[in-house]
Amino acid sequence: MEDSPDNTRSLLRARIRAIITGIAFFFPGFLFSLPVTCTWANHYYAGEAQAPLGAIFPSFIIGVIAAVACTIYLLKKAKSGGR
């Protein structure tokens, strides 16, 4: 099977879309994990006024993990042709 310019361009578009969508998944991962990590931080740093600040780093890591996982999944899907 030969790669025509249209197929190559279509695959490139699918890969770019997968990467952009994967990066966009950082924000839901970060925002939806923030209440859970805030609850954890309030328990872990009990009595400290700045306890919610301790929740930002774990939520950031969860957002990065969500973005990477989504990007990998969508790139594999784009490579297989959406099957």
Image (cartoon, grey):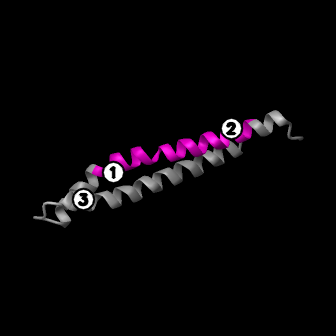
Helix, strand or loop at mark 1: helix
The residue labelled by disc 3 is 53
What's the residue type where badge 1 is placed?
Ser
- Residue at far left of view: 47
What's the residue type where badge 2 is placed?
Arg
> Would residue 54 appear left or right of 80 to someone viewing this image?
left
Mark 3–mark 1 Cα distance, whole angstroms, equals: 14 Å
Label 1 neighbour load within 10 Å: few <14, some 14-19, many 20+? some
Q: Which mark is residue 13?
A: 2
Q: Note whether residue 81 is visible.
A: no
Which percent across, then down, holds residue 12?
A: 71, 41
Q: Residue at x 40, y 59 (%)?
A: 61
Mark 2–mark 1 Cα distance, whole angstroms, equals: 31 Å
The residue labelled by disc 1 is 33
Which percent across, then down, holds residue 22?
A: 53, 46
The question of residue 24 being in magenta is answered with yes
